[in-house]
Image (cartoon, rainbow, N blue to C red):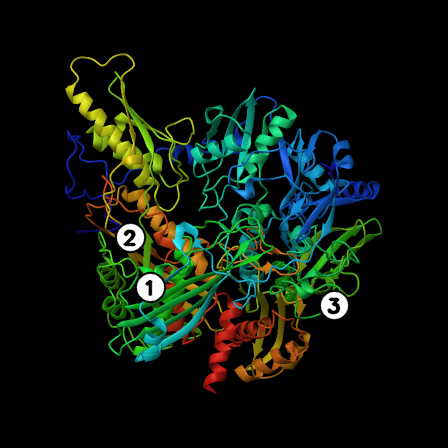
Amino acid sequence: MRHTTAASAAAPRTGHRAPPPSQSPDGPALGASVERREGHEKVRGTARYAAEYHPHGRVYAWPVPATVSRGRVVRVDDAEALDLPGVLAVLTPDTAPRLGDAGDAVLRVLQDDRVPHRGWYVALVVAETLEAARAAAAAVHVDYETEPHDAALTADHPDAYIPESVNGGYPAVRERGDPDAAFEAAQVRVDTGYRVPPEHNQPMEPHAATAEWHGDRLTLHDSDQGASAVGAALAALFELPEDHVTVVAEHVGGGFGSKGTPRPHAVLAAMAARQVGRPVTLALPRRHLPAIVGHRPPTLHRIRLGADRGGRLTSLVHEITTQTSRVKEFVEQAATPGRTMYGCEHSRTVHRAVPLDVPTPSWMRAPGVAPGMYALESAMDELAGTLGLDPIELRVRNDTDREPDSDRPFSSRHLVDCLREGADRFGWAGRDPRPGSDRRGALLIGTGVASALYPVHFQPSLATAHALPDGSHVVRVAAADIGTGSRTVLAQIAADALGVPLDRVRAEVGSSALPTAPLAGGSSGTASWGTAVHEACTALAGRLAEHRGPLPPEGLRETADTSDAADRGAGYARDAFGAHFAEVQVDTDSGEVRIRRLLGVFAAGHVLNARTARSQFLGGMTMGAGMALMEGSTMEPSFGDFTETDLALYHVPSHADIADIEAHWIDEEDAHLNPMGSKGIGEIGIVGTAAAVGNAVHHATGVRYRELPLTPDRILAGLSGAVAAAS
Amino acid sequence: MKPYAYVRAATLDEATAAYAGHSGAHYLGGGTNLVDLMKLGVTAPDALVDISRLPLDGIELRPDGALRIGATARNSDIAAHPVVRDRWPVLSQALLAGASGQLRNIATAGGNLLQRTRCPFFQDTAKPCNKRRPGSGCAAREGSHRDHAVLGHSPHCIATHPSDMAVALAALDATVELHGTGGERSVPAAEFHRLPGDRPEQDTVLRPGELITAIVLPPHSAGLPSAYRKARDRASYAFALASVAALVEVQDGLVRRSALAFGALAHRPWRAHRAEEALRGVEPTRAAVERAVDAELASAEPLRDNAYKVPLARNLACEVLTRLAGPR
C-alpha cells in the first residue's frame, strides 16, 4: 500500500504489477498525471457535440410534452402547427412510425395514446429551424381524457410493495440472524429516519442527437454513455440489422447516469429523420430533462442500529421506501450499503417501491449507494453521539474483513486507513465532540466524518489493438468518454501493455462502429474496456516480439473479447472504500451553511491517471456537497411533475460554496481486480459526502437534520426548534 | 417562430414612437430576461424596440450631489463605479449579490427593474398563473411556494420581485425617471413596483410606452453607512430567499434617520416605513432594533411553506441595522 497525495500525484508508482514486455524509457504510463487528450479541443470549443453536426439539409425537431398528469390522448390537432412557415411534419401517436421492441418501455415514444405521467411526449414537430420547431410545438393542440393520478410518495402508501429485485440486480430483501430481537436486546439503540428528495443528473450538455438515414442505414450522432447499447436499441426499435446503425458519441458533456441507457431523444431524432427524409437534430430543452431522462427517486429511510456499550453493532436494519413509475419498474437500491459496510451479526435490509404517476426514475451517480450511505452514515453518527464515542473510532470498531452479507473476504478493504489518513490530514485529533461548542459570533462551526463505499463492477468488452508500420499503435473500443478521460486512460493502458511511450498510442472511442463495449456506468468503464484493451495489446505485443522485419502495410492487429475471461475476483467481495471529512459554518441569522473544508481519502485500487482521477473524486465530492446543501426537487402532487426544471431553481454548487476541497488516495495492491489493478472511481466521491456535511452541521448546531437538502429554511426551523427545546 | 418587428432606436423619441407604432411592442435592453421569456413562450412580442444603443448608459454625478444612472448602464459598470462604491455602497453590494458576472455585464439598470418574477408557474405556460394569464388562477398558492411572498400578497398572486438592485434603490430613496409620449415624470423607486392586488399582470406603475431613462440617487442618502445582505440557497448565482438593504445615520448616539427595505418578501421591494419610524430618535440597541423590525414584520402573512422568511428577514435586518448603527 502506498500513500499518494493530490499535490504529489505525479509521483511515479511503485512497480508492483507484472512489468510490461518491454519498458518505455519514460516509465509506466499508468499512475502518471496525464492530460486529457481532447482537453485542448474542448477548451477551444472545437470539440463537436451531438447537436453540432450539420449534415446537408439538416432540420430540427422539438417535442411536445403532455400537460396532464395521467390519461389518454384523444386528439392531436396539428393544423395550426403545420400552417406555420418552415414546419415539415408533426409526428403523433397516430402518425409516428411503429417501432419494434428494445425491451425498454421509456423508448416506446409516440406508439400509443397513453399518458403515463406529465411531461411524457405526445407529439414531435420537425421544422426547418429550431425557432420554427419550437413555435410549432407550442401550436400543437392536444385533447386529453384525464384520469385521476397519484404522485405523492409516503412511507405508508397502500400500494407499496417489495419488488423481486432492485436496481443492479440486488435482492430487495436480505436478512441474517434475528435483527429485531437483537435490536430489542441491544445495550444501545438508535431508531431514526432520513429523507432524500428527488435529484436530477443535469449534465451540462442536455441530451441531443443528430440522425441521418442513407437508405435503411442510420447514422446517429448522440450524447450518451454507451454507443454500442444505443446502436443495439435503435436497431431493435427500427427492426434493422445492428450493422445498419452507427451511433457516434465522440464527445459527451456529462451524463451522471442519465445517458447510461438509450433515451427517447435518440429514437425521436431517428424517427423524425426517417419521416421527413432529411437529417434531424433534436436537442432536448433543459426543462424537459426531469420528466424524460430519469431522476434519482426520493428515498424514505428508516434505520435501526443496535450496539453494545463498546460500540460494536449487534443489529442493523435499513428499510427504504421509494417511488417508481407506471412505465417501468426502477427501484433505487438504497438499502444495499448496510450489506457491506460494517460487521454485524443480525441485519435486515428491505426495499419497498410505490408505483406512482410520475416520470420514470433511473440511474444517477452512485444509484442507491449515495442516498443509502447518507442515511446509514448519518445514523452511525447518531450512534456515536449516543455512545459518547468518537465517530471514527465507532467505524474502526465495526470494520470487518469479510462482507457480512455474503461472508466472502474482501479482496482489499482500506476503510480504516482512509479514516486515519483523513483524520491526520484534516486535523481531527483534539476535536471537541460537544455539539455547538464552536461559536464565532453568529456562526457555528462544526466538523463531521463519514465513510464512503462503492462496489467494483466489471462487464465484458471487445477491443482491438493495431500496430502500424510507422511504429504507432491504435486501440479501438466503443467506450464512452463523458468527460472523465477514458480516451486518455485507455491509451495509458495500451502503452504499458505494449511497452511503448504514450505518444505512440492513439485510442479511438465513442462509436458503435468500434468493437462492442459496455457503457460508462457503475464506475466500471475503465476496468471493463481497459481489460479488453490490455488483453488485445498484450497479444499484439507477443506477436510483435516474434515478428521479424518490417510490418506488412496493413500492420498487425489483435482482438480481445473478455466475455469468457476468468473472473479474478471469484470468491471475493470487491469494493472501493473512502472517508469524507467536512468542516462547515452555519450562519444562525441566515440559516446558510457553507463548507469551509471538504477532504476525501479513497482506496480504490491502483489509481491509473492521477490528474483525471483527482477530477473524478473532486467532482463526486462537489456533487455530494450539492446533495447535502442544495440539490433536490419538489414533486408537485397536483401536477405530477417536478417544479425545479431549470438551473436557476435546481441549484448545483458554485465555487463559492466550498472554500477548500482536497482529494487524496491510498494506492492499493489488489490482484483480484483486473490487469490494471483498478477499482472504479467515478462514483465513490459522491458517496458519504452528504453525511459528512450533515454530521458537521449537527456538530456545529446540535440539531440533527434528517431531510436533505440543508437549505436555510430547514436550518432556521431546526435552530428555532433547538432554542424552543432548550428553553 | 412568431415573427416580430425589430426596431433599433437612435433617439428616445424614435424609441417611444416605434413603441407607439407597433401594438404588442416591448423594449429590449440587455435581453437577459426578456429573451428567456420569449423562448419559454411566456412573452410573445410583436415588435422589439431595441434601446440598448440609446445614449443612456452614462453614470453622472450632478452638481447637487445626486447620481444619475442612465437606464442602459450595465449592472457591472454601476457596481464598479467608484462613486457608487464610495457614496452608495449598498447599491454596489446589491448588484454584485445578483446574477453572475456574465449576466451583470449585459443586463441594464432599466432591465433589472423590469425583470419578471421567477415563480416557476409564471414560467410554465402549461400551468395556471394570474400574472401570465389573468383569471387562470394561482398554482403557487397551493403548490410550491417556499420562495414566495409573505408580505402584501393577494389571493391572485404570491409572486416576489427578484431584483436585488431594486431593494437597494428603495432604501436609498432613488427615483426612476420616465419618458413617455406624454412627457417626462419621475417615480420613487420604492413605488415603482406594485403590489399584486387583483391586477398581478401589472408589475409596475409604468404606463404603456413609457421608457425608463435613468435612476437617480439623491444626495441625502449619499455617504451614510449602508449595506445589503442576502440569504440564498447557494453562495453565488441564486435569487434571494430574503434580503435587506439598509442605511443608518446615528447622531449623538441616537438614530437620526434610517432606511430599510426587504427583498424577496413581496411583489415589490418592501420599504419598511414602520420600522424606520420606530427607530427614529432612539438609541439603536439590539432590543430597539428588534422591536422596530418586528413592528414591520407584524403584518406578514406567511403561507404553508414559507413562514421561515419572517424570522430570516428579521435576523438579517437586525444584524445589518445593528452593524450599521454600531461604532465605526
Residue A576 is tagged as 2
* Chain bearing mark 1: A
> Residue A613's spot in the image, x, y percent?
31, 45
The answer to whether A310 appears left or right of A164 in the picture is: left
> Residue A256's spot in the image, x, y percent?
44, 46
Q: Which residue is mark 3?
A: B154
Residue A450 is tagged as 1
Residue A183 lies in quadrant = bottom left
- Tag 2: amino acid: Ala
- Tag 1: amino acid: Ala
Q: Secondary structure at mark 3?
A: loop
In primary-sequence order, the first of circles 1 and 2 is 1
| Same-subunit check for callouts 3 and 2 | no
Viewer can see residue B299: yes
Q: Secondary structure at mark 1?
A: strand
The answer to whether A411 appears left or right of A169 in the picture is: left
Give the class, few, some or many, for how many residues have Cα within 10 Å of label 2's Cα (few <14, many ≥20): many
Give the CA distance from mark 1 to mark 2: 14 Å
- Tag 3: amino acid: Ser
Q: Secondary structure at mark 2?
A: strand
Which residue is painted at 27% across and 34% down in the image? Answer: A492
